[in-house]
Image (cartoon, grey):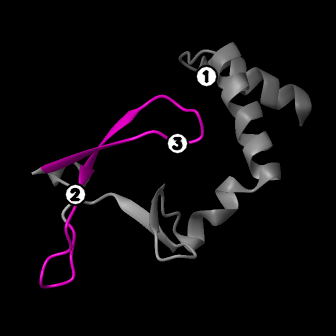
Amino acid sequence: MYHAVMQSCGMKEMAMDLKIVGKSGQISIGKSMAGVGFIMEVLPGGDILLKHAVVVPSNERWLHEPAMKEKLARADEWMRNNPVHATRLEELEARLKAVA
């Protein structure tokens, strides 16, 4: 295995592994990355940048909209401030009768 050390833009040195594209056109980035999603960006000059990505199914996208995130945050706060307890059915019945 080859290793490279790179220093760029005045940043501290970062150890990197040199990966060679195999005959099949693939690069192995290790078993620890198995199943992880990436966005591959081909930069001018031919460099390739892999960015870690999380896939959100389209039918769950609404959960990540700002308005819904705010509602979910309020619901979480309410749950923290209102612990779960057993319902007292007699009290509930009395309250319902009072409203009706």
**Residue 87, horizontal then vertical, whole percent:** 58, 20
- Mark 3, Cα crowd under 10 Å, few <14 / some 14-19 / many 20+, is few
Per the rendered image, the range of residues in magenta is 2-27
Magenta segment: does it hold 24? yes
Specify the amino acid type for callout 2.
Ala
Q: Nearer the viewer, mark 3 or mark 2?
A: 3
Query: Quarter of the image containing the C terminus?
Result: top right
Element under disc 3: loop
Q: For residue 99, which quarter of the picture?
A: top right
Specify the amino acid type for callout 3.
Ser
Q: Residue at x 56, y 15 (%)?
A: 85
Element under disc 1: helix
Q: Residue at x 48, y 63 (%)?
A: 55
**Residue 68, horizontal then vertical, whole percent:** 76, 50
Give the residue at the far right of this rendering.
99
Whether the residues at callouts 2 and 1 have beta carbons within 8 Å, the answer is: no
Name the residue carrying label 3. Answer: 8
| Foreground of the two, 62 or 5 | 5
Q: Earlier in the sequence, mark 2 or mark 1?
A: 2
**Residue 17, horizontal then vertical, whole percent:** 24, 49
Question: Can you say whether 23 is above or below 43 in the image?
Answer: below
Label annotation for residue 42: none
| Foreground of the two, 89 or 61 | 61
Name the residue carrying label 2. Answer: 34
- CA gap between label 3 and label 2 equals 29 Å
